[in-house]
Amino acid sequence: MSKKKSETQKTPKGHEIPVPTKEEFETNLDKVAKPEKKSPASRPKKD
C-alpha cells in the first residue's frame, strides 16, 4: 500500500472513525463554511 495508514479514533459508543489530516480538515471546512447558494429559507418572507 502506498497510502500511509490513517489514524482512527474510538467514539464513546465504540465506533472507530478516521481522523482527517490537517489538510483534509481545512478543505472540508472551506466547503461547509462557504455555501455556494443561499437557501430559500434564509431569505426574509414577503407579505
Image: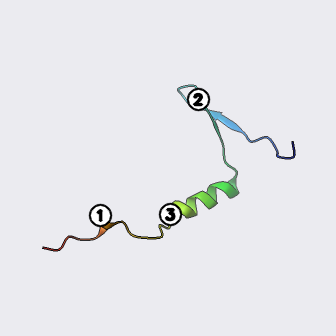
N-term-proximal mark, 1 vs 3: 3
Instruction: Characterize the local packing of mark 1: few (<14), some (14-19) or many (20 or more) Cα atoms within 10 angstroms.
Output: few
Residue type of the residue flagged with mark 2: His
**SS state under label 1:** helix
Whole-Å distance between the Cαs marked 1 and 2? Answer: 35 Å
Q: Amino acid at mark 3?
A: Ala
Q: Nearer the viewer, residue 46 or 30?
A: 46
Left or right relative to 45: residue 2: right
Residue highlighted by disc 3: 33
Are the residues at dot 1 and dot 2 in contact (C-beta closer than 8 Å)? no
Task: Give whichever of discs 1 and 2 has the lower sequence position.
Answer: 2
Amino acid type at image mark 1: Ala
Asked if residue 42 lies left or right of residue 47, the reply is right
Q: Rounded to the nearest whole Å, what is the CA distance between mark 1 and mark 3?
A: 17 Å
Q: Residue at x 58, y 25 (%)?
A: 14
Q: Name, please, the residue furthest toward the bottom.
A: 46
Closer to the eye: label 1 or 2: 1
**Residue 42, placed above or below residue 12:** below
* Residue 5, quarter of picture: top right
- The percent coordinates of residue 30 (x first, y second) are 57, 64
Residue under numbered circle 2 = 15
**Residue at label 1?**
41
Question: Eyeballing the image, is 5 above or below 39?
Answer: above
Q: Is residue 46 above or below residue 27?
A: below
Q: What is the quadrant of the C terminus in the image?
A: bottom left
What is the secondary structure assignment of the residue under circle 2?
loop
